[in-house]
Image (spheres, rainbow, N blue to C red):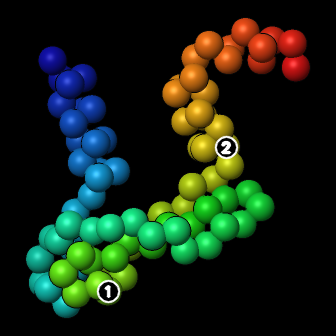
Amino acid sequence: MTARMNQQQFENFTASSLYCEKCKAAMPVRERLLLVLPDREIFDYLCTECGSSVGRREVTAGEKMMAQAIGAPRDGRSARLG
Ligand SMILES: [Zn+2]
């Protein structure tokens, strides 16, 4: 039962509403790819109301690979050959 709650919290975190200092409230945000580096990607979160930057997120190559592995479980067979 609690597992379901945890999943919901995680979804809220990724879909995100962040506190905007200009609007003085938690606002819905949109994610913008800010910078692509060899080992990570940096995303900027912009307030949908006033457009100011309210947060930042880094996705490392390791995290991306993990997300892909979860998204495509049948690739586990070929991974044994590598
Ligand atoms: Zn705002």
Give the amino acid at mark 2. Answer: Gly
The residue carrying mark 1 has its beta carbon less than 8 Å from ligand 1: yes
Give the answer, above or below, for where 43 lies relative to 59: below
Q: Position of residue 36 (x, y in %)?
A: 66, 67
Q: Amino acid at mark 1?
A: Ser
Q: CA distance from mark 1 to mark 2?
A: 29 Å
Residue at disc 2, CB closer than 8 Å to ligand 1: no
Residue that lies at the very extreme toward the right in this rendered image? 82
- Tell me the tag on residue 52: 1
- Residue carrying label 2: 62
Q: Going 56% across and 67% down the picture, which residue do you hit?
A: 42
For the N terminus, give its image quadrant: top left
Local SS, label 2: helix
* Coordinates of residue 22 in the picture (x, y in percent): 19, 90
Above/below status of 77 relative to 13: above
Q: Is residue 38 above or below residue 70?
A: below
Q: Dot 1: few (<14), some (14–19), or many (≥20) neighbours within 10 Å?
A: some
Which residue occupies 27% across, 58% down? 16
